[in-house]
Amino acid sequence: GCLATTVNISTKVKDAAGNSLASAYTSSFTTEDLPIPTNFTAISVAEFAYPWAIQLNWDAVPGMPRYNIGWGKVVSGARDFRSSTNPTTNSHKVRGLDNSTTYCFRVRSFYDGSPTKVSDFAYDNATTGS
């Protein structure tokens, strides 16, 4: 949801005679928690031009212009994210992956306006065929 916040800042500035000068600055801004993409799946697919690919799909987040995806190999049970991209749709195919390898994937809502806003990540793993 949204949270409207008002910030009041005042200074303790005095003139040469020691009189306090009135000063105040008021600013209002809105912060948002962006929704985490739901139903995130990573599915191994064989392709003619590339040995193996992983098809990523998730439910679109209404009004979200872009997403941030990260991926890498699962090494000794740990996720090792090394690559990323920012698609504008709610699906993406990662191509040219190694055979019989488990990869980790993550996706989050991403708004690259001013200021930049991001959601938490959704995660999934998939193993390519042999």
Image: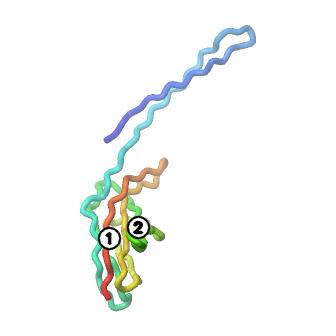
Q: Which residue is mark 2?
A: 79
C-alpha span from label 1 to label 2: 9 Å
Where residue 62 sits, quadrant-wise, is: bottom left
**Residue type (three-letter) at the residue carrying disc 2:** Arg
Q: Residue under circle 1?
A: 125
Q: Earlier in the sequence, mark 1 or mark 2?
A: 2
The front one of 1 and 107 is 107
Point 26% across, 59% down: residue? 38
Task: Classify 47 as above or below 111.
Answer: below
* Secondary element at tag 1: strand
Q: Mark 2 and mark 1 in contact (Cβ < 8 Å)? A: yes
Residue extending farthest to the bottom is 48
Residue drawn 24% across the image and 62% down it: 39
Q: Is the residue marked by circle 2 packed among few (<14), some (14-19), or many (20+) residues within 10 Å?
A: some
Which quadrant of the figure contains the N terminus?
A: top left
Q: Which residue is found at the position 35% from the left and 72% from the top? A: 92
Q: Quadrant of residue 66?
A: bottom left
- Decide: is 64 above or below 46: above
